[in-house]
Amino acid sequence: MYINSSRFLESASAESAAGQLLILGFDGTAYTPAIGALFKKFRPGGVILFSRNMESPDQIKTLVSDMVKLSEDVTGLTPFVCVDQEGGRVSRLPQKFYPKFPTAKLLAADGSEELVYNTYNEMGVILRGLGFNVDFAPVADLDTNPVNPIIGDRSFGADPEKTAKLCVAAINGLRGAGILSCSKHFPGHGDTSLDSHLDLPVDPRPAKRFFEAELYPFEKTIEAGVDFIMTAHVVYTALDAELPATLSEKIVTGILRDKMGYKGIIAGDDMDMKAIADRWGDAEAARLALKAGVDVLLVCHESPRRQTVYDAVLREVADGELDDAGIKSRIERILAAKSKIAVVRGDG
C-alpha cells in the first residue's frame, strides 16, 4: 500500500503528518485493544519490536501481521516494522528458534565481504519471512576505545576502510533479502567511555579525526544507498560544543545533509535513553531534534514520553515551525522508503 507524497500531504491532517515522523515501541506479544488505541491516537509511521515482543515464529508473524493491517487501516500507509538485529549481543530474535549470529568483530576477524553479505542476508531472509522490513544495522562506528561499554564487538573494528567495506556488504546482504538498512551511530560512537543509554558521553577529539576516519564508513554506506542513518546521543565538542549529535543542527544538517549529501532518512536514536531524557524535557528534545534535521524520532518503550513527544511533533507541524518544505521533504523521504517496501511485497 503506497500513495505519493503530494497526495498524502494534500489530504493528510497535521496529526497524520506528525505520526509519520514517529517510530514507537510497545509492550506485549499480541494485539490488544490498548495497542489499537495507540495506533489510532498517534498514527505512527512505524513500530519497533524487541525481545520482549517476540516468543516464537508463529507468534511474531501474527503480531507483525496485525500491526501492519492496523497501521494500514489507520494511516493508509505501510508502516516501517523495525528491529535491532545485528548479531552477537544485539540479537532480538528468540535464540530457541533461530541461529546465534556472530558479532561484527568476529566477522571482521575473517575479513570476508562475502561472509558478511551472507550472514546479513540470512538474517534478512528470516526477518523478511517474519514480516519485518527495516533492520537498524549495521554498526558503522569505529571501535577505537577498549573501555567503550556499548560498542566494542558490535563494530567491525578500528580500520575505516575495512569497516566501510564490511558495512556495505552488510547493507547489500539485507537489501538482497528485501530489508531496509541503517548505518549507526552518526558521526561515531566508538571512542566513548560511557553508554548513552545511561549517561551523556562526550567525545573531545578534534574535528580532523572525524573527517579523516570516523565519517568514512558512513560516507561509503551513503554511496551504497543505505536507507536510514541513525544519530548518536553523544556530544562531539569539536563539532558542536553544546548539543549531542541527535539535537545538533551543525552535525545533522551541516555535516550529514549538506557536507556529505545524504538524501535518505535520518533517525534519532531512542528518545528514552538517559543521555537525552535526563537532560532535556521531552518537548524540547523533540523540537531540537526536528530543528537539527532529524526525520523520524524513536520512542521505544511504553511511557508518557510517547504522548509528550507526539504532542511536540504535532505542534511543530501544526504551527508551521516545520515549514512546508521541511515537512514535505521529510514525508517524501519516508514515502520513498515505504515505496521500496511496497515493491518487495508486490504492491506495485
Image (cartoon, rainbow, N blue to C red):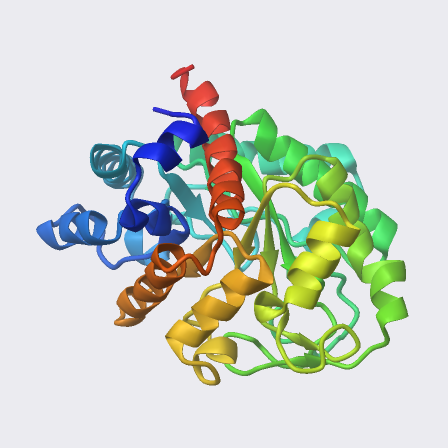
Q: 233 left or right of 91?
A: right
For residue 179, above or below residue 103: above
Q: 208 left or right of 199?
A: right
Image coords of residue 86 (percent x, y): 56, 50
Q: Nearer the viewer, residue 219 or 32?
A: 219
Q: Nearer the viewer, residue 160 or 13?
A: 13
For residue 129, above or below residue 284: above
For the point 57% across and 55% down, the residue is 88
Q: Nearer the viewer, residue 62 or 3?
A: 3
Q: Nearer the viewer, residue 90 or 332?
A: 332
Residue farthest to the left, as pictured: 33
For residue 147, above or below residue 46: below
**In which quadrant is the N terminus drawn?**
top left
Image coords of residue 338 (percent x, y): 45, 32
Numbered label tally: 0
Is residue 32 visible in the rendered image? The answer is yes
Quadrant of the image occupied by residue 220: top right
Image coords of residue 164 (percent x, y): 79, 47
For the point 52% across and 65% down, the residue is 289
Quadrant of the image occupied by residue 129: top left
Is residue 47 visible in the rendered image? The answer is no
For the point 42% across and 23% down, the residue is 342
Image coords of residue 75 (percent x, y): 27, 37
**In which quadrant is the C terminus drawn?**
top left
For the point 72% across and 42% down, the residue is 222
For residue 180, above or below residue 108: above
